[in-house]
Amino acid sequence: MNNFEFRNPVQIVFGKKTEERAGELAAQYGAKKVLLHYGGGSIKKSGLYDRIVKSLESSGIVWAELPGVKPNPRLSLVREGVTLCREENIDLILAVGGGSVIDSAKAIGIGVKYDGDVWDFYTGKAEPQESLPTAVVLTIPAAGSESSQGSVITNEDGGLKRPVNAACMFPAFSICNPELAFTLPVHQIAAGTADIFAHMHERYFTNIKHVDLTDRLIEAGMRNIIHHAPRLLDASEDYDTWAEVMWTGTVAHNNILDTGRLGDWASHDIEHELSGMFDIAHGAGLAIIIPAWMKFVYKHDVERFAQFAERVFFVERDYADPEKTVLEGIYRLEQHFKRMGMAVRLSEVGITADSFEEMADRATSGDTATLGNFVKLDKESIIRILKLAE
């Protein structure tokens, strides 16, 4: 097990009607003027917008608003938000939505405190040192951004989707009410739960030995998603099932599962090129890439993959032929994604082989960098993974 430091300062407020505390909590963090940041009109149709506004008003907080966040959040709106926060003297950004809204809010937060262009952080030209405080009312369990220090933004100029992580980007508080997910459409449920699974998958496949506790914590989280996610397809207003999924999504990405180990993250980095170039949902892309990645790298550590198959999908281990166990585990993962209505091949979402080299080239900065930690992947390796996903 590696040495580690663990810190997660996010105040999680979980349960029914907790969104009604948004104003009270914002006031506790010294907010007097808030930027209400959200996506489309769904929070108004559901009544959530009115409940949050009422909560802000009751705490004496005034607000401005910036709607319009799209999946794979756009740099142009982030820049607009930076300008608006400065003009309106905003002192806290309240993100109401899922990972895209939260990531956009975090980007605005670090942009406000920076003299240059916020995109500098996402290209590695600068590192965030401070941020305008952000807070969250979570409506889509998926990205885990409500308790993470990361943000992923897409630059429309070139279709580049890039991440940044910094300690100053943790939200001050996050309100997590499973009831707010009841109206999600099936495709968002499927993509969101795939994203949650992916966050655990990325941490699970590690070269670090003697990490038994976090192995078993991750396995429990994976099992929880596999068990509960399909139930949401038929019972989308089952509070207890949503509570399990929402809390798993938060724990999956709040860094507790990283302790003592080094995760991989190649699948995420490859998928960013799918989202950046083709604007598909992040979780949808991950459901395609992860099984293909597994097929390409499993021989690096057959025992870890056999453990995954046995503990997560209850595959009976074949000691004479452990690869048979591994391949059955990968097959069952693909079947889970299919059961959720997800595509598991690039051809199913209209992505063809003529784009593979460009995606691999972009992912590796012209074959000058590698992806992943479990197995280092160069440009040719990524092309081969994309062909396995074809």
Image (cartoon, rainbow, N blue to C red):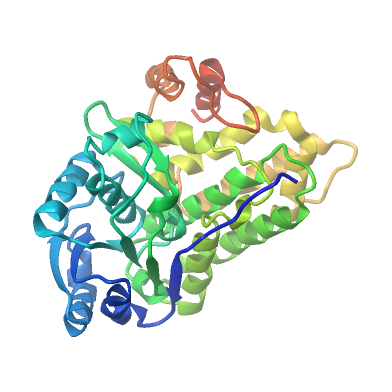
Which residue occupies the extreme right position in the image? 320
Left/right placement of residue 1 relative to residue 107 reads right
Question: Relative to 296, does residue 220 appear above or below in the rendering?
Answer: below
Left/right placement of residue 83 relative to residue 366 reads left
On the image, the x and y values in percent for residue 298 come to 70, 33
Residue at left offset 46%, top offset 21%: 364
On the image, the x and y values in percent for residue 385 come to 55, 26
Closer-to-camera residue (312/15): 15
Which residue occupies the extreme left position in the image? 87
On the image, the x and y values in percent for residue 238 come to 45, 77
Closer-to-camera residue (293/347): 293
On the image, the x and y values in percent for residue 304 come to 75, 41
Residue at left offset 39%, top offset 68%: 173
Residue at left offset 58%, top offset 33%: 293
Residue at left offset 42%, top offset 73%: 178
Question: Relative to 91, does residue 123 appear above or below in the rendering?
Answer: above
In this orientation, does residue 367 appear?
Answer: yes
Tally of numbered discs? 0
Question: Relative to 176, does residue 204 appear above or below in the rendering?
Answer: above
Left/right placement of residue 120 relative to residue 382 reads left
In this orientation, does residue 344 appear?
Answer: no
Question: Relative to 110, does residue 146 appear above or below in the rendering?
Answer: below
Closer-to-camera residue (382/77): 77
